[in-house]
Amino acid sequence: MHTPLTDMLGIRYPIIMAPMFLVSNTSMVKEACAAGITGAIPALNYRTIEELRAAITELKNKANGPFGINLIVNKSNFRYKEQLEVCCELQVDYIITSLGSPKETIEMAHASGVKVFCDVVNLEYAKKVEKMGCDAVIAVNRDAGGHAGPLPANELLPLLKRECSIPVISAGGVGDYKGLKEVLDLGADGASVGSVFIATHEAPVSEEYKNAIVDYGANDIVMTTKLSGTPCTVIKTPYVEEIGTNQNFLERLLNKNKRLKKWMKALTFIRGMKRLKQAAFSATYKSVWCAGPSIDYVDQILPVREVVLKLVSDDGDK
């Protein structure tokens, strides 16, 4: 599994344990590194800059491999500037940018020797961030968990590989060795894998959330705009069915107002993240659990290292 991603990061297998809101933590990343892959954590998983700094310092001292931090770079993230400064100061191995222009991030990160990978969902945006100087693109396809793209992997990956000169990392749908091999055969230089790591011993979320990953499948994943204003995948629990997946008329109207949409988007994001947090860490009938279709491959709660084994070994998938 030697690819440009393994060369770039010095890892054994071309896999990024994807940054997952509320789920990813330092214990998971340390185990990922020990298993020969890399892992990333959303900066928003830490309430304060001091907590983010402490987590990065811990990983710098104790992770046996490279790790990254995911930054939301649009205006909904009011702590973006401080988060970027800490990532550059402490020199994380790479930053993954999502939901906005990565221009400033790329400039500051490169000045500090930090690589930048950018989430993209189409060729137009991939070419823009490549021109800005990013080190790789993460091709988010329609089977991704969280903010999925519109195209299937078998369309998006060949397109980006043909038109871009930087590494292309596939995000979405990979849950076992066969799936990893398929995206590599399509030309991907690696895979960003998230949802299958939610049901692990090291994940800090509730047993109810982990069991939902085991019990539900790909057909139970729906898209909602109620969490961040941007379409996001969640498990169709009874509560999600009850509240629906689309914003109401007033929310849609305010999102179209030029003066108010920035604040409306931020309010939607804050409310949505609070709802996710309540469901992730406690038992409640108001369950809104973020996940992608790859939960189809999860049939038990395992240590992170065993999930990695299922991804990189044909034997581990039997």
Image: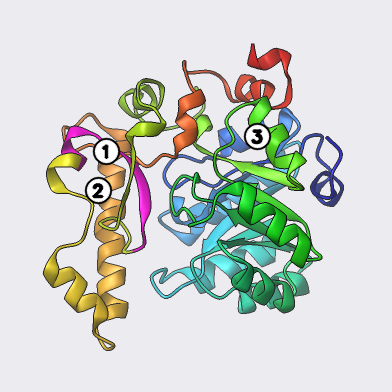
Q: The N terminus lies in which quarter of the figure?
A: top right
Task: Kindly indicate the quadrant of the structure image that contains residue 111.
Answer: bottom right
Q: Where is residue 50 in the image (x, y as percent from the top left)?
A: 50, 57
- State which mark lies toward you, 1 or 3: 1
Distance CA(mark 1)–CA(mark 3): 25 Å
Residue 245: within the magenta? no
Label 1 sits on a secondary structure element that is helix
Q: What residue is at 62 percent from the left and 53 percent from the top?
A: 155
> Vertical placement of 237 versus 271: above or below?
above
- State which mark lies toward you, 2 or 3: 2
Q: Residues within 10 Å of mark 1 (few under 14, many from 20)?
A: many
Q: Residues within 10 Å of mark 3 (few under 14, many from 20)?
A: many
What residue did someone put label 3 on? 30
What span is in magenta? Answer: 230-240
Contact (CB < 8 A) between labels 2 and 1?
yes
Q: Nearer the viewer, residue 133 or 144?
A: 144
Q: What residue is at 24 percent from the left and 58 percent from the top?
A: 271
What residue did someone put label 1 on? 279
Check the image and tell me how it is coloured. rainbow
Label 3 sits on a secondary structure element that is helix
At label 2, the amino acid type is: Arg
Distance CA(mark 2)–CA(mark 1): 6 Å
Q: The C terminus lies in which quarter of the figure?
A: top right
